[in-house]
Amino acid sequence: MYLNLLKEMFSKMVIKKNASLIPQYYHEDFLLYTNDQKQDYNQFLKSHEDYYKTPIQYEVEYHEETLLEQGNKVAGRIWITTSRPNESPKKIEVMLIAEYKNEKLYRVWELTYPDWSNLPAFK
């Protein structure tokens, strides 16, 4: 169930760059722990509204052999490829654990390589 929700969020919100769906997929008390940084729901919402207004495009690949669901948590490895005009695509490896509450993302712990926050597209 939760793995399907995670994949649905990527296909309907991230790939389509639809920030209006954040309240549908993310709990109001959401926290993201990523590469030694922390974002709350409002910071996450604002940043994604800003990113989605740019020409950036996203592709998501799942390493199916590593994806698992236990209780209200999903863990695994995915790749998110970002592309912008006049730049080479950047493939980001993501190791994540996602916790759900009331069928919405409540906590996400992730490590990415390279660190997405150091890429020009996210400055």
Image (cartoon, rainbow, N blue to C red):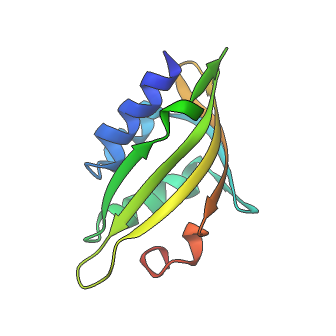
The residue lying at 76 percent from left, 63 percent from top is 36
The x and y percentages for residue 30 are 62, 40
Nearer to us in this view, 64 or 69: 64
User: Residue 113 or 4: which is nearer the viewer?
Assistant: 113
Q: Residue furthest toward the bottom?
A: 86
How far from the left and from the top, in percent, is residue 113? 61, 64
Please count the marks in the image.
0
* Residue 31 percent across, percent down from the top left: 67, 45
Q: Could you tell whether 89 is left or right of 94 in the image?
A: left
The residue sitting at 37% across, 65% down in the picture is 82
Residue sitting at the far front: 65
Whether 84 is drawn above or below 57: the answer is below
Task: Residue 44: name its quadrant.
Answer: bottom right
Residue 10, image x, y percentages: 38, 41
Q: Residue at x 59, y 34 (%)?
A: 66
For the point 56% across and 52% down, which residue is it? Answer: 42
Relative to 5, residue 20 above or below: below
Snapshot quadrant of residue 88: bottom left
* Image position of 9 with respect to 17: above or below: above
- In this view, the residue in front, 21 or 59, is 59
